Amino acid sequence: MRLNIIITGCLLVISTAMAIAPSSSTPPAQYTVNGVGLGVSEAEVYHLLQGLTVRKGAYGNGVNSLAVYEKGLFVYLSPRGRVVRVQGTSLERDSHILFSRGDPEERVEKVLGDATFDSLPRQHSRDSAQGLRVFDFDIPKVHVMCKMSDVGSPDVRQIATITM
């Protein structure tokens, strides 16, 4: 009988400790482009963009788009009204801006690491591909296009658009 009480007490202490112990698994980072993430509803997008002019378009395949020109933001919605693609000017993780339009292209690899696809070899000429360079990453699934700077040094590529 005494042994049962001791075992029950030990199990109670262990289960209590497990219940109050912090979880060792952290939730995955939430990436967004201009504050809009994949999978959010059309209503959530409108809520995020309150006060801005949103233009809605439709495609024949049931996909709708939302454009906010003053933010350089384009959102594509599935036929069920969920974001399936978003293109804009800044990439955020957990509400912190990682990089945005105008940052030098080196910032992309500094923040996200090595790209899974890079459109130009490391040594490239200024005129190749009209000065465009494209990076693709798997985590997050993001596509970054850089172009030659219009201002400042003409040999510096800057981030132009970010698509997720």
Image (cartoon, rainbow, N blue to C red):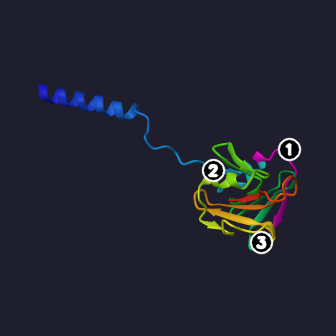
Residue 24 located left or right of residue 16: right
How many numbered circles does the render carry? 3
Nearer to me, 128 or 14: 128
Q: Is residue 131 above or below residue 70?
A: below
Residue holding disc 2: 111
In primary-sequence order, the first of circles 2 and 3 is 2
Q: Secondary structure at mark 2?
A: helix
Look at discs 2 and 3 and give the one toward the viewer.
3
Task: Kindly report the distance in space between the C-alpha atoms of the residues bearing marks 2 and 3.
Answer: 25 Å
Which numbered disc covers residue 128?
3
Q: Quadrant of the N terminus?
A: top left
Is disc 1 surrounded by few (<14), some (14 to 19) or many (20+) residues within 10 Å? Answer: few
Residue 11 in which image quadrant: top left
Residue type at the position of mark 1: Gly
Where is the C terminus found, in terms of image quarters?
Answer: bottom right
Sequence-earlier tag: 1 or 2: 1
Residue ID for mark 1: 51
Image spot of residue 141 (x, y percent):
62, 60
The magenta stretch spans which residues?
47-58
What is the CA distance from the residue labelled 1 to the residue labelled 3? 41 Å
What's the distance in space between the residues labelled 1 and 2, CA to CA?
31 Å
